[in-house]
């Protein structure tokens, strides 16, 4: 079951976050900083699955952007890994060059953000 | 009032902020503008404002004032408004807010809307944050939508149904008829969500599980089509057709096939097919293979298939990709218990993984290596593991050290090897060794009689150079105290004996005492060792007397007490000194619980020695003794005789005696903690005999009725009895404490005392909190020895915290059934 889905840049700024379970708003920022810290400290040689508290983090780096998905124990990590990539490909297709070209400023139109959220909702629920 | 800025502008502005403070300022300004705009009830720009609010919420700023606005947007007729409104509801509202109930009517209307997109929005929102009341009201509508022919709606309805079932499990029956045709769909979206729905239903209810087993052939067919069908651009991911659906179906098959032979048989072919046909060059294929392996392991598959699965995992291990290796190690760990021999084949690869750079992989490899150690490979494995211990990160050292000790204890090929290994661990990772390893080691050393000289010599050499590692120093101090005479006489056979004088030995012990690095416990060990040497050394007794008398005024209370007592021993009881400080006898060996799972035979047939069958509730004597003493209100447990923990239950009886008045315990010795090991060890040993000779609970005497020993103030304690056929005077009582009040009882402590002719042994409880409303129980095991077959009576004392106040109660239990003691 997916617990959360984050897109965070290298400086630690959250570009997109979606939580599938209720987490208090002040705990969210704390969670995000800790998560990005553990992802940033990994080198390229290390594997993409981290054990963090009581869930697993699966992360993937695209240029300066990290996409991190937190799942619980029952999930197939490699399937989630593929899912992240699938998601990025969809974004790429749908919003054409917006995402790939501008990783430093992931700009989105209002409609895009909304559709992004809906897409995340649908994809996420499939994993819940 | 000028038109509020668009979301895009807002994002751009926020991006330009260079510091956190600047960003906060911009956001606050915008929040104020939005708030005033809301107050003006402006319909045209509400949608834009809420969108901005959502963005700010995502960044972490509070946005609760937008909740009502979301509701207004939902009620509007424009699609764009509804869209933002529902999105806002999903993000900002949840069942904790009272406002959300207002949405129910809107959602109901929208579920019946003419446009499918609006219906879709409503389904999405309900499936995201619907509370149980909402779900109950709207479940009928969802069920209706589950049966439409519109695949767009059908898939959303399926996901919504999953949420409804989660919130209100009783409604599961309602969705059952709708699921009949779900798998007949062609649309992958619907298929995927239907499989999710079926999975959810099967996981929640065993009846549903049995009912859906008949779907296995259909699922197998769908999976087959997916694999065999050619390229379909819609569903292709790196050459594989809809891998997400494949993984989902495999998972559902796993749930359906668990514990069921027929279904498992029906799946065998397709699993073999998936396992062999899937392309493994990309991650996608590997993900599917991983899921397949997990499924094969879980269902009742035939052995050929299991070997295939393990071979796939072995192949994963050789792959360059870290992710795959990690995943393989994790699954191998899960299967090592059941398919041990197959996993052994890949042992060398696993051991190589110990040298990997990645922390997660190293941890898995370490756990797996411990599971694979057996008598045949112990030497080689230990070499690798010791090397690993040297070079690994500190967080692993403790676990690794404990694991090495356990493995060495079970499979040591020779005593000397064993002691060498222990020494190596103590010197490399000495400070990370767990505290309870010290008494175990001491016990081990005592038992290997012929190695005493060798051991003490090596230990002496080890601490000569460096006495900062506490466990090492403790063991060394104890050994030197016990076997100092062997050290000085230079009689070691195994290696070159060294020339040590008595003074040198005393020097090192004294420096341990003085050193700032030694903890209080270590100092205690050193002082006792010095004292013991007074009988073993001949020319330095005066020096020893001097040292002991110096510490008679030490600030450390423990040291002071010991020194004063030893002084007394010199002055008044000198005639007893040599008897008291005699060599320790060989101790009963009792198994310990280590951090890693204890694998019973590790893939080899051996006559299971008694020690390797850990009785389920048989912790080592030190820990249970400590628990018993902890029970008695935190008495300072000083390991005066660290090697005779078996004396503790007997001496604890003295304190229990004081607490509970007139019931005496057998064998309460003089409570003076002076070392008197010899007479006391024989006493509780027959209790330990009961422990180490057989697994206790294999002879459950049927039909001894259980009794309610205590029931007051909502706390109920039940006793269930078991008798051991091998030792008819032992009765094992399992107590279960449950709490029917509405608040938990914390810090729950159960104590018991029995009449003089009985002996009592209390093991550690399962927890110290009794949850409210009888939702759980605390379990604790009591062993009572009743050699004279007298009627069992017991006094119990309960202490716990309830409703903020500390409660305490004494009670007597007299209603033991005759079968429990006759």
Image (cartoon, coloured by chain):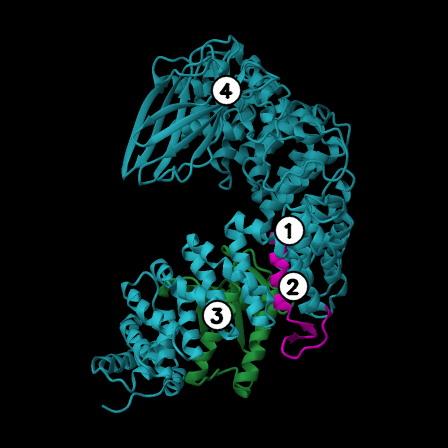
Chain colours: A green, B cyan
Say which residue label 3 marks. B156
Say which residue label 4 marks. B704
Q: Which stretch did the figure color magenta?
A: B228-256
Nearest the viewer among B426 and B187 is B187
Say which residue label 2 marks. B323
Marks 1 and 3: same chain?
A: yes
Q: Secondary structure at mark 3?
A: helix
Q: Which residue is painted at 26% across and 82% down in the image? A: B33
Left or right: A85 with respect to B648? right
Question: Distance between the Cα atoms at labels 3 and 2?
Answer: 33 Å
Instruction: Assess whether mark 4 and mark 2 are in contact (beta carbons under 8 angstroms).
Output: no
For marks 1 and 4, give the one nearer the viewer. Answer: 1
Instruction: Assess whether mark 2 and mark 3 are in contact (beta carbons under 8 angstroms).
Output: no
For marks 3 and 2, give the one nearer the viewer. Answer: 3
Pick whichever of labels 2 and 1 is earlier in the sequence. 1
Question: Distance between the Cα atoms at labels 3 and 4?
Answer: 56 Å
The vertical placement of B80 against B163, above or below, is: below
Question: Distance between the Cα atoms at labels 1 and 3?
Answer: 28 Å
Q: Secondary structure at mark 2?
A: helix
Marks 3 and 2: same chain?
A: yes
Question: Distance between the Cα atoms at labels 1 and 4?
Answer: 38 Å
Say which residue label 1 marks. B257
Question: Distance between the Cα atoms at labels 2 and 1?
Answer: 28 Å
Residue B246 part of the magenta-drawn span: yes
């Amino acid at each position: 079951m997916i617990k959360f889905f984050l897109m965070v840049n290298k400086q630690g700024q959250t570009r997109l976050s979606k939580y599938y379970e209720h987490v208090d708003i002040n705990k969210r920022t704390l969670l995000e900083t800790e998560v990005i810290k553990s992802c940033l400290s990994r080198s390229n040689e290390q594997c993409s699955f981290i054990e963090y508290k009581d869930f697993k983090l699966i992360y993937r780096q695209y240029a300066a952007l990290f996409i991190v998905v937190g799942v619980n124990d029952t999930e197939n990590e490699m399937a989630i890994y593929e899912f992240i990539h699938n998601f990025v490909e969809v974004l790429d297709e749908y919003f054409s060059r917006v995402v790939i070209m501008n990783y430093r400023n992931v700009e989105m139109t209002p409609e895009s953000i909304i559709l992004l959220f809906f897409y995340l909702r649908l994809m996420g629920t499939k994993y819940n | 009032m000028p038109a509020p800025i668009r979301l895009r502008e807002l994002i751009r502005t926020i991006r330009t902020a260079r510091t956190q403070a600047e960003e906060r300022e911009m956001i606050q300004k915008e929040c104020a503008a939005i708030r005033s705009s809301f107050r003006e009830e402006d319909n045209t720009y509400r949608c834009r404002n809420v969108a901005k609010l959502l963005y700010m919420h995502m960044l972490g700023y509070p946005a609760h004032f937008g909740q009502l606005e979301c509701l207004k947007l939902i009620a509007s007729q424009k699609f764009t408004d509804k869209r933002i409104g529902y999105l806002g509801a999903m993000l900002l509202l949840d069942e904790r807010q009272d406002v959300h109930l207002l949405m129910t009517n809107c959602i109901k209307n929208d579920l019946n809307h003419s446009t499918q997109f609006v219906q879709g929005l409503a389904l999405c929102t309900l499936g995201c944050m619907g509370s149980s009341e909402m779900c109950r009201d709207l479940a009928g509508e969802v069920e209706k939508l589950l049966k439409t022919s519109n695949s767009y709606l059908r898939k959303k309805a399926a996901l919504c149904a999953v949420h409804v079932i989660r919130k209100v499990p009783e409604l599961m029956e309602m969705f059952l008829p709708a699921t009949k045709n779900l798998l007949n769909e062609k649309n992958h979206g619907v298929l995927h969500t239907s499989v999710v729905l079926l999975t959810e239903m099967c996981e929640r209810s065993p009846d549903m599980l049995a009912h859906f087993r008949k779907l296995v052939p259909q699922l197998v067919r769908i999976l087959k089509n997916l694999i065999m069908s050619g390229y379909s651009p819609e569903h292709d991911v790196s050459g594989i057709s809809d891998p997400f659906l494949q993984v989902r179906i495999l998972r559902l098959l796993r749930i359906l096939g668990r514990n069921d032979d027929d279904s498992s048989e029906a799946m065998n072919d397709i699993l073999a097919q998936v396992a062999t046909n899937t392309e493994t060059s990309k991650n996608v294929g590997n993900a599917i293979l991983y899921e397949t392996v997990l499924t094969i392991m879980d269902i009742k598959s035939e052995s050929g298939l299991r070997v295939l699965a393990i071979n796939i995992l072995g192949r994963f291990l050789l792959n360059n990709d870290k992710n795959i290796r990690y995943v393989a190690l994790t699954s191998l760990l899960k299967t090592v218990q059941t398919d041990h021999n197959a996993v052994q084949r890949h042992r060398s690869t696993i051991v190589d993984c110990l040298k990997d750079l990645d922390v997660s992989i190293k941890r898995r490899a370490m756990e797996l290596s411990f599971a694979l150690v057996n008598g045949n490979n112990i030497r080689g494995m230990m070499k690798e593991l010791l090397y690993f211990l040297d070079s690994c990160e500190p967080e692993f050292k403790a676990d690794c050290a404990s694991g090495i000790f356990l493995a060495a204890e079970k499979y040591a090929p020779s005593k000397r090897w064993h002691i060498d290994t222990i020494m190596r661990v103590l010197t490399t990772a000495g400070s990370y060794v767990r505290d309870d390893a010290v008494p175990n080691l001491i016990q081990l050393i005592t038992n290997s009689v012929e190695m005493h000289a060798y051991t003490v010599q090596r230990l002496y050499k080890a601490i000569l150079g460096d006495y900062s590692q506490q466990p090492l120093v403790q063991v060394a101090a104890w050994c030197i105290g016990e076997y100092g005479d062997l050290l000085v006489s230079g009689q070691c056979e195994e290696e070159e004996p060294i020339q040590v004088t008595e003074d040198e030995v005393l020097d090192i012990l004294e420096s341990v005492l003085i050193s700032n690095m030694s903890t209080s416990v270590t100092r205690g060990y050193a002082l006792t060792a010095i004292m013991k040497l007074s009988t073993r050394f001949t020319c330095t007794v005066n020096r020893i007397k001097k040292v002991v008398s110096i510490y008679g005024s030490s600030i450390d209370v423990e040291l002071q007490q010991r020194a004063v007592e030893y002084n007394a021993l010199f002055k008044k009881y000198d005639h007893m000194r040599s008897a008291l400080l005699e060599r320790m006898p060989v101790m009963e060996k009792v198994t310990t619980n280590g951090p890693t799972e204890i694998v019973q035979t590790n893939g080899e047939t051996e006559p299971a020695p008694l020690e390797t069958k850990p009785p389920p509730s048989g912790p080592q004597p030190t820990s249970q003794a400590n628990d018993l003493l902890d029970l008695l209100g935190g008495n300072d447990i000083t390991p005066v005789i660290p090697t005779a923990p078996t004396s503790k239950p007997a001496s604890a009886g003295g304190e229990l005696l004081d607490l509970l008045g007139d019931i005496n315990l057998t064998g309460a010795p003089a409570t003076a903690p002076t070392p008197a090991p010899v007479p006391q060890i024989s006493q509780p040993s027959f209790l330990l005999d009961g422990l180490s000779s057989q697994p206790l609970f294999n002879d459950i005497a049927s039909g001894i009725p259980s009794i309610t020993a205590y029931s007051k103030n909502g706390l109920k304690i039940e006793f269930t009895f078991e008798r051991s056929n091998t030792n008819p005077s032992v009765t094992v009582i399992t107590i279960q404490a449950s709490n029917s009040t509405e608040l938990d009882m914390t810090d729950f402590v159960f104590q018991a005392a029995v009449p003089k002719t009985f002996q009592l042994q209390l093991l550690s409880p399962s927890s110290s909190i009794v949850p409210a409303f009888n939702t759980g129980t605390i379990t604790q095991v009591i062993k009572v020895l009743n050699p004279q077959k007298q009627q069992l009576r017991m006094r119990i004392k309960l202490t716990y915290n309830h409703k903020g106040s500390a409660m305490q109660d004494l009670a007597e239990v007299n209603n033991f059934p005759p079968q429990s003691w006759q």
